[in-house]
Amino acid sequence: MSGYDLPDITAASALIRHALAGRPLATGSEYGELFDRYLHHQAFRDLVASVADGLDLAVLQAPPTTGLVLSPNPDSPFRLRFADLRPWTPDERLVAGLVLLGIAALRFPREEDLDAEGIVRYVTVGSVEKFMREAIRPLAIAPTADAKSIEAYARSAAEAYERMPGLLRTEKRGQRKRGCTMRVIEDVFDLLIEQRMARRPARMDDDTLQLTDRFRVHVAEIAGSEALAVLRAVAAQQPAKG
Amino acid sequence: MNAASKPTDNGVEGSRERECATLADTPGAYAADQMKHARTEKPSHSDGPDLWSLPAMTVGGSLDPADGPMGPGLDVDRASDERRWRAQAVISPIEQIVHALASVQIREEDYDARRLAHHVVDLAVRSMGFAQETTTDEVLDELAAMARAMRPDAPSDEWRDIAARVFGGLQNVSHDYDKFRFTGIAADGVRREFSFRLIELREHGDDAVVEATSEAINLFVSALDIEPSNAERAYQALLARQLEEGHLEQAIRTAQIAGRASIASAALINDAIERAQRDVDPDVWVSVIEPELNESQGRVRSRIADDDLIYEKARDLTDADDPKVRAEAGAVGEIVREQRRIHVALERRLVVARPAFLDAQRSQRLAVRRRLRLLSVDTGLFRSVIELAKPDALAVTDVFADQALGVVMPHLMRLDTLIDALLEPVVARERRSVDLEVVGDVDERCDPQRFAPVSLAAAAAVLATAREAPLRLSELLTRARSAGDPDVIVLVRLASLFAFAPERSDDPDEDETRPDDLVAGLAALHDGAILRDDGYAGADLLVGSAEAIEALPAPAKPERKALEPISLAVFRSRR
């Protein structure tokens, strides 16, 4: 039996509760104090990791400005389900997956970008659409050894992207309509906001998104993907943007 | 029942072999019989049919061939009836003791002779087997102590006298220590004698020790409400004796029943442990549960020792020359080993029972006690909150919403698995062709979800009058009522409301909802007039053509009474 007592376990559980709720870190708040303890006490860090493990969660990183970034294990009750997503058509699903990869590649084109904490990165529906249209060609011709690899899937997603029109608008209100890639990008933006991986910056139009550090941590987890590498190669040729 | 305890010499053990079948329905009765069987030499004679010798069908409808050849058995109902009769007879000696005490001026209110008699049986059963057996002096001392507790102010001679009378009564001392004898008369007129002893004495060195007879064990195990742990002990005693005397077939059956008694006993102890975790009141723990668990622990340890002893005995027999004996001894050994496993597991549970209690108590201390209260949302929440300033109101409504919604589990996105899942091609499933039932043309007049065309036409006629010049909703409802069709009233009201607030889809992909023909070109205005109607309440809208309504002057906004903000503390104090 280790030297933990009940208040320690309660504190570790409370820290995970705050992290799950996605609350912002605030000095003097319970979350802030617990996170400070997490950063400075190895034993408490181990305890938090154990409690998270018991909940089928993994602690990905703990950036000082963001707090605890948790990720659900594949069978965790906290995992995002398809039922939580928009009712996309099969093609829209493929496009959405590719858009997520595209946003990651567009704003984190180099390895060192993944280590740069706290840098504000904006992304817009238009910039993503433009980037994806440029990237799908190299992606479609990228060699893949395994037909069931994620790279092969990305290739078929690129074909779906190419098939889908960029923009369709509703007749009356002129909003983006289902069945176009820009509407899917908009949906993906909403998903990132729900997951606190992005936020709508104040005094900017609705098409602009500010990626949070949480998104950077998650992108670092997929840094080894071949499909991401192809997209990042395309992105690296573009002029750097904030 | 024709009961008599007259001493006679006509022994009835002649048909003991068949007693098993008679008693096999109940484990306790079977064990009681086997106990007797193990201790008694097979008699050489029989003096006629008695109750024990009657072959009875077992519950399952079969007779045990091991019990020997038998005549036609009683049917299940008769056998059950006879068993009930015997159960009654077995306790009769105790009732006789009560009456005998009354005849010598010892009042029932002073001493509980039944309890004293039960205690003798308990002592005899519990001491049988392996541990030190109970001597007659010890029994008398125990009974005198109990009698003293029942009437502390009586002289000590009286306690000893009571003890001797009860102990003597159980041995049928008034009939020269003979068996108790009763005669049962069945429904068919057949008389059957039933004779038995409850207590027997056996020489043990310079002393005499008390033994319970089969009937006493029957009394102990099945005729009365007994504790399974004691039954378990009785079976183990019986089993040991059967092994010693080489009755291995019976020993196997006894071992099986003893195993069941072990499980029953384990269930009781487990229940006590569960209770310890549920009811974590320290007073209850100290006064009730802890002593109970300690006692159980002692008993289980004693059972483990007994198991070891029986196992040893069974193992000794596995060296026998006779292969049948070896096989039967092996079977007994296996059963006892399983029994021991149950006891060891139980002991382990008992050992950890105390920490389990402490944990349960600690978690109860940590839990916040919550008071359950029924809430009237209207008066308790809405009306109260509306008087509050926004920040104070939010403090209340946020808490209410959180509690009312219950636990909301956040679903976190994991970028890598989500991308994989999204990009993975959807497997196209072949649609199975389904033969659709041909319904034919639907008669719209029969559709209960639709208004009848005649009602629609009547409502349109009423609304057409409003198109000529704007009319109040109250006037339109009056005209609708004159049509004599309730649907017309509903349609006019719905059309007026729709004209006031046309429904629009929130889905940007869809165009605005097209108004029905009924309300096409209609508009409505709320100018502050209140609807006075028997069926409806709300605004008395002005309904007319869109142009006519547009041309009307905009109604003056009603002056709103500014709400006086109050603090949450003031609100609470008012309540």
Image: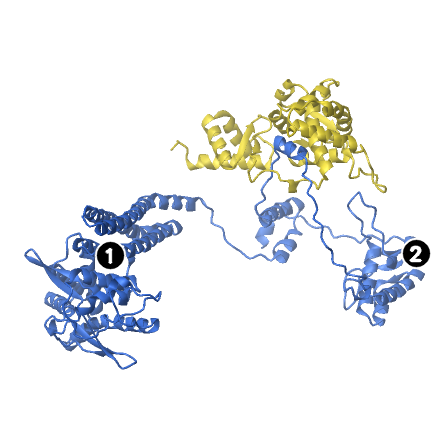
Dividing the image into 4 quarters, which one contains the C terminus of chain B?
A: bottom right
State the image quarter where residue B437 is shown: bottom right
Up the image or down, A159 lies above or below B177; here it is above
Which kind of residue does numbered mark 1 sit on? Glu
User: Quick one: B177 or A124, which is closer to the camera?
Assistant: B177
Left or right of B28, for residue B537? right
Q: Position of residue B325 (x, y in %)?
A: 21, 51
Farthest left residue? Answer: B206
Whether residue B229 is visible, yes or no, is no
Farthest bottom residue? Answer: B189
Residue at mark 2:
B548
First along the sequence among labels 1 and 2: 1
Count numbered badges in the picture: 2
Residue at mark 1:
B249
State the image quarter where residue A81 is shown: top right
Chain (yellow): A
User: Quick one: B152 or A17, which is closer to the camera?
Assistant: A17
Q: Position of residue B366 (x, y in %)?
A: 44, 44
Which kind of residue does numbered mark 2 sit on? Ala
Up the image or down, B108 lies above or below A155; here it is below
Colour of chain B, in one word, is blue
